[in-house]
Amino acid sequence: MYSGQNSKMSSKSNSKFLGQVLVLLKGNTVAQIIPVIITPIITRLYSIESIGALAVFVSLSSIIAALSPAGLEQAVVLAHSNRRANRVILIAGMSVLIFSLLSLIIITIVKLAVPDNRLLIELNKFIWMIPIASALMASTNIINQYHLRYSELKKISNGVILKFTSLGVIQIGLGLLAKVESGLVWGRISSNIAQFLFVARNLNVKNFRSSRNEMVATLKRYKKFPIFTVWGTFANISAIYIVSVLIANYYSIKEAGEFALMQRVLVIPIFFIGQAFGQIYYKHIVAERHKTGFGLKSYRNAIALLSISGVVIFVPLYFFGIDFIDVFLGGKVEDISTYVKILAPMFFIRYIANPLSMTLNAFERQELNMIWQVTLFASIVAVFLVSNLLNYDLTQLLRIYSVVVSIMYTIQIVLSFKIACTPPSSQSTVLS
């Protein structure tokens, strides 16, 4: 009898988990269809070099956006009370403002110190827009965590839809009417503004008022996030986005554009699905930890769903998707089949590992996450440095990159499992 009740509860939990994933997935899927559909138009309106410049701009903005909230956005869902969660949001917002100003100062110094740098020349005037774009991205992520806490998933989903709808309209409009190569970047900035205004529109500022002592106490409570989590998150995002920057720096902006096109059509839509899983998984495993001290049930549910969906996505992609993609892009990426064959296994492992990595934050094991993330980032940079010294071409580099990153993400999956099934008494950090 007890076993039957347990089975029903597990089934209900799985159904709820999947249902919440589908709410976010609906918005993410619709939003990602738009960039994919307009890609053949974009490749005919803009040069590969412009696509490469956009990739570098987005990469640098994303890296700064990962650092600027000091990791505190992940504590919004974890906070025990709504008042404490509001204080976390306020502190994270202040951190974003400070980092945006610091990044502007750093960009100014770098531009004066190395005015002939290839990347700075390629980005030209848009280098000054990076702090603004990163602040918008970071602020939107913080507010989305607030909506996630209250299970307002439709607001997150609709915000993503608005972002990518406006992105497509503006990029195509500027390409057709103004015929300016900068239309891609302006479209990106404008869509970030639209998404931020949408998700922030109903927030009541009065709810976020707090005394200095309360804010200091909250910061002390979640001090592990700015000490450990932020650097782990920064290293993780950097490991993903630094590739386009390094390709542009060591090879060419054109090859960075080709790589970005491959990611635009294949990788980004897939990983938005993974992001939807990750957001809901984090909410469920935090709740399970509060209730039982473990996270094994949530982990098993998530890895099963991720594995099944990953096989459905990546197997057909690896064997049947190449010719269609080449035609879809109008032959713009000559080595698209080579890129996909080399990177598909790595992308499959990463698709599973990324959402599960939230386990370490849910159990406040940020120090382990930071060590892994920094190791991953260092490994990727080392691959590029060694390949450059050995004069490897881009295809040779990507083969090494795929193997190294696959090993690192496999380690992350195992580490997340170990943390999820560790008895509460063995955890180094206990919720207060």
Image (cartoon, grey):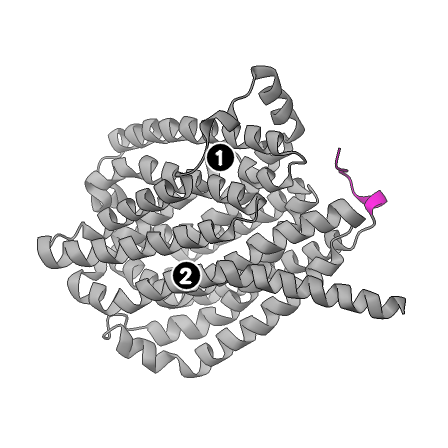
Left or right: 199 as drawn, with respect to 87 = left
Which stretch did the figure color magenta?
424-432
Locate residue 186, reporting x and y percent: 22, 47
Q: Is residue 428 above or below residue 49?
A: above
Residue 227: x and y in percent read 60, 32
Give the dominant element type of the magenta stretch: helix, strand or loop: loop
Residue at x-position 46% and y-position 63%:
26
In the figure, 401 relative to 328: above or below? above
x, y percent for residue 143 = 47, 40
Q: Nearer the viewer, residue 90 or 120?
A: 90
| Residue linked to disc 1 | 69
- Answer with mark 2 or mark 1, whichever residue precedes in sequence: 1
- Which residue type does callout 2 highlight? Ile
Local secondary structure at mark 1: loop
Residue at image point 26% right, 72% down: 329
In the image, which disc is placed on residue 15?
none
* Magenta stretch contains residue 428: yes
Point 22% across, 63% down: residue: 42
Q: Which residue type carries mark 1?
A: Pro
Which residue is outermost to the right? 1
Is residue 97 visible to the viewer in this orientation of the structure? yes
Which residue is drawn at the image coordinates 33% and 82% (left, top)? Answer: 323
Quadrant of the image containing the N terminus: bottom right
Give the number of the disc on residue 268.
2
